[in-house]
Amino acid sequence: MSNRIGELKAKLNQSNIDGMIVTNPVSVRYLTGLTAEGTLLITKQENVFITDGRYIEEVNSRLTINDGIICYDYNDLNEEDDLNFFADCEKVGFEEKYVTYVDYSKFLVKYRIKELVEASKFIEKQRMVKDEDEIACIEKACNITDSCFLHLLDFIKVGMTEKEIVAEIVYFFLKNGADGEAFDTIVATGPNSSKPHAIPTDRKILPGDPILIDFGAKYRGYCADMTRTIFAGQPSEEDAKLYEFLLAVQERARMKIKDGASGMEIAKGVETELQARGYDLIHGLGHGVGIEVHEKPILSHKVNWDLQENNVVTCEPGIYIPGRIGIRIEDTVLVKKLESRSLTKSNKNLLTI
Ligand SMILES: [Mn+2]
C-alpha cells in the first residue's frame, strides 16, 4: 500500500492543520488497511490506532505491513496521562460528516485539543483518485461480477423468482473469491423494473419480461457496480428499440468520460438525449466507486466537478416507464487521460435467456 497517511498529512499541513482524528471506519480502512473498530490519530510525531481487546490480535498482525502506526488497547491507556498525542498541535482535523456532537465534545476534552477543524474533504479528495492497489482490487471485483453475469445467462429461467436470482448471485460471489456483495443486489423483473431501486420479490419471471440486474462483487473491501437488463425471450419491437436507444446513449456518455471532462456536462448531454425522446433521467448519471459503492465524484447536472485520471466512476443511464418497464445499463469505468477503460466488460448487446 502506498503511503496514504503521509500524503494526507502533507495536505493537512498545507492548510496549517497539525493532525487528524479519523473515526469513519471507511477512512480508517483506506488509510491503514485495517478493518478493526477504533480511532486513528494522525499526530505530528506518530500515528496511533486505539482499539480494544477484540481487535488487538488482528491489528498487530496487520500492522507489520503498515509502517508507522502504533496500536494501543484503549483499556491500557490512562486518560490522565496517556492521551497527550496532540499536545503540540494548534489545529486538529476531524471528520465532521461522521462525528456526533457528543463525540466532538469528548474529543476536545479527552485529547486536550485546542481547536478542532472540519477536515472530511481532505480524505474524500484523496480517495477519489485511486492508486494501483485500489485499481487492482476494483478490477478484480469487476471480473468476478462479469463471470457471474455469464453464469446468470445460463442460470436464469422463466418461472424463477427475483429472490432466487439474488441468492445465486451471492452464492456465486462467495464461491469465486469475493468478500460478498458490494451492495444489496437489485433484481427487478417485468413491471418491477421501472423502480430504479426495487427490492427483490417473490415475483416469477414471465415470458417477454425485462430482467434488470444491478449488482457487484466486493473484493478485499473494494466494490464493483454493474447493471445489465436482459429479456426472458424476445422482447416486443418497442422494447427492443428502447434498449438499443439507451445502449447508444450509454456508450456515447461512456466515451466522454476522461481526465478533465466535466461530469456535469456529460450528465446534461445524456439528459438532453433522453428528453428528446420524452424520457427523464430520474437519477444521477453516475458516481464514484471504491471502498464505498457510492462515493465521490458524482456525475450529475447538479454537481460541477471535472473528472481526474484514476477516478473510478459509473456510467448508468436508465429509462423507466412506470408500471411497465425499466432499462438501465451501467459500467464501472476507470478514468484515463485519453481513453477511459470499462472495468466491467460484460456483453451489452440485447441478450435473451
Ligand atoms: Mn451504480
Image (cartoon, rainbow, N blue to C red):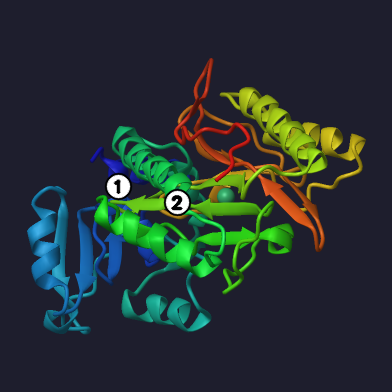
Q: Quadrant of residue 304?
A: top right
* Position of residue 316 measured from the top left corner of the image (x, y, whole percent): 64, 42
* Position of residue 207 measured from the top left corner of the image (x, y, whole percent): 66, 55
Is 206 located above or below residue 122 in the figure?
A: below
**Image position of 238 (left or right of 54):** right
**Image position of 304 (left or right of 171):** right
Packing grade of label 2 (10 A; few <14, some 14-19, many >=20) is many
In depth, the one of 238 and 16 nearer the eye is 238
For mark 2, what is the residue? 216
Inspect this view and state whether residue 52 appears. Answer: yes
What's the amino acid at mark 1? Answer: Ile
In depth, the one of 160 and 27 nearer the eye is 160
Q: Quadrant of residue 52?
A: bottom left
Inspect this view and state whether residue 283 appears. Answer: no
Is 149 located above or below residue 311 in the figure?
A: below
Distance in Å between CA atoms under marks 1 and 2: 28 Å
| Numbered mark located on residue 5 in the image | 1
Is 85 located above or below residue 11 in the figure?
A: below
